[in-house]
Image: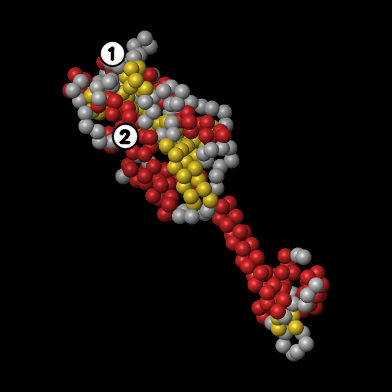
Amino acid sequence: MELRQLRYFLAVAEELHFGRAAEKLHMSQPPLTVQIRRLEKELGSELFDRSTRRVSLTPMGESFQKRVKAVLDDLEDAVAEINDVGSGRRGRLRVGFVSSASYTVIPEAVRRFRELQPRVDLVLRPLTSGEQAEELFEGGLDLGLIRDPEPAPGLRLEPLLTEALVAVIPERHPLASHHEVVPDELAQEGMILFPYRLMPGFVAQVLRIFTPGRIPHVVQQAIHQETVVGLVAAGLGISILPESISRFQTTGVVIRPITTSPKTSLLIAQAGRPAPAAAEFVACLHDAVVAAAT
């Protein structure tokens, strides 16, 4: 049994006229009649009653019509769904992001993407840069937002946003009264920092601020920016974070610029074959950056 035979049968069943069905199918009537006969022979049942001037469905034909129509409708839906997935209009997109991205690009990019692609299941996962790199290489993520990543073979990086690094200081600390702080002043303080293995590029970027041999002592490690800020507010030490942390309102801390104006960058990371919907989400990320700047 061939798919075209089912289409031929359904056309005749709908028209109840071989001539009109042949016109609908853009073919001549004799080959159509031959195909219907072959189908009936294969099924072992007559599908049409041709005993009168008017073609009609037999009871077997009526039952078969319902089943064939359902099958062909499902097939059309499946083809449409595959095309949608291939073009990025449907499916799933898994995006990882560092916590700082939730203060900058993530909210606006997600809003835009969901308006443009409502049928794509967008899965958002807050992860450190190191965790994202592993997930990207292992196929657990389609896209990542990584801070100051170190180059890695197979990891495709695209710059998205650059911002200043700032000092986060307990509000009762002597440095809180300064309008800006110098690295040597910060080097004398205990620092709260991310674990190197989870945020290697960012930690390296922070440590580059200081003169070799004048690196501050790390008194506490934390994974999320919110946790870091909370520990600073508790007086456990100072920290250095992206300037966007100022959008996270927490009592007990002050944000101060650093005299050397150090920078940190947020990059888009991909590995392996790009997901169909990834390009559109990347465009939404860039649009979010532009929107935030205006």
Q: CA distance from mark 2 to mark 1?
A: 25 Å
On the image, numbered disc 1 is attached to which residue? 188
- Viewer-closest of 245 and 78: 78
* Residue occupying the far top of the picture: 213
Residue at the (25%, 25%) spot, across then down = 234
The image quarter containing residue 254 is: top left
Q: Where residue 209 appears, x then y in whole percent? A: 35, 19
SS at circle 2: helix
- Viewer-closest of 37 and 188: 37
Q: Where residue 257 appears, x then y in whole percent? A: 27, 26
Count of marks overlaid on the render: 2
* Residue occupying the far bottom of the picture: 53
Neighbourhood count class around disc 1 (C-alpha, 10 Å): few under 14, some 14–19, many 20 upward: few
Q: Where residue 132 appears, x then y in whole percent? A: 48, 33
* 13 with respect to 41 (left or right): left
On the image, numbered disc 2 is attached to which residue? 244
* 216 with respect to 123 (left or right): left
Which residue type carries mark 1?
Gln
SS at circle 1: loop
Residue 42 higher or lower than 261, as above or below: below
Q: In the rendered image, is residue 256 in sight? A: no
Q: Where residue 68 appears, x then y in whole percent? A: 67, 69
Q: Quadrant of the N terminus?
A: bottom right
